[in-house]
Amino acid sequence: MTTTRNQVLADIRAATARGERPGHQTHSFATDLQAEAALSPSALVHMFAERVSEYKAWVGYSTSAGLSEAIGERLALYGTRYVVPADFPADLVQQLPCVRDEQLSHADIASADGVVSLSALGIAQTGSIVLDAGVGQGRRVLTLLPDYHLCVVYAASIVLTVPEAFERLRASIQERRAPLTFISGPSATSDIELNRVEGVHGPRRLEVIIVDAPGR
């Protein structure tokens, strides 16, 4: 123990004299950032999809022309009554079992089989989806109460980092004072015995459709 302690302290003193942190490779993080910043649009989408999948969320792809069909295929798997924001694009849900949120009660929203929404943007590094109460996203309660959330993310709205996301959201924050919701996978927490429990603070099941991804 004494030998190990002395060695650690010696390393710290030597590193301090050189102006470095002990054991810290100064080039590594900066190099990673530079490499990621040079990602192509298709690589950016791939990173986003991979990180979202790591949260146990389903990820699929669609074109703009085939989006209504893609949404319908997912909804057919889980139920017969879904809610969508009041301003959700009509052409995407014309033939689907969806009810618009014209100030539905919390009970009505919670009893639905799920919710379908658009999104403001996606963050590739963290696999996060951001809602800013914009068109097709609805009020916050709409995407928190149902057990299932199908979220549409356009490839062009995916950014690499959290700072980039906030830069794009500047108008929403400063001009609209919009509430922001960051979604990183299905809602999950752990009880006192560290058992994973899903669906406590939001939807238990999250699915994401990425639209117009390059190369697909």
Image (spheres, rainbow, N blue to C red):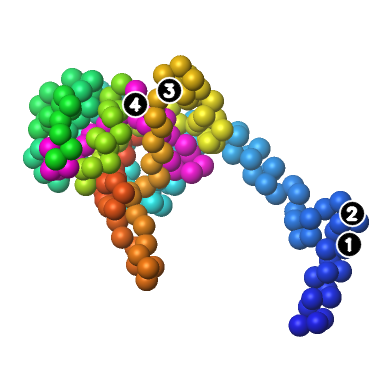
- Residue at 28% from the left image edge and 41% from the top image edge: 144
Q: Are circles 1 and 4 on residues that touch, CB within 8 Å?
A: no
Q: Of the residues shown, which amino acid type is indicated by label 2?
A: Arg
Residue 176 in sight here: yes
| Helix, strand or loop under label 3 | loop
Which is more N-terminal, label 3 or label 1? 1
Q: Are circles 2 and 3 on residues that touch, CB within 8 Å?
A: no
Q: Are circles 3 and 4 on residues that touch, CB within 8 Å?
A: no
Residue 154 in picture, x, y percent from top left: 37, 28
Residue 76 in sight here: no
Residue 79 in picture, x, y percent from top left: 11, 44
Q: Is residue 23 above or below residue 94?
A: below
Of the 4 image quadrants, the one containing the N terminus is bottom right
Q: On the image, numbered disc 4 is attached to which residue?
A: 133
Q: On the image, numbered disc 1 is attached to which residue?
A: 14
Which is more N-terminal, label 4 or label 1? 1
Residue 62 in picture, x, y percent from top left: 29, 32
Q: On the image, numbered disc 2 is attached to which residue?
A: 18
Q: Is residue 49 magenta?
A: no
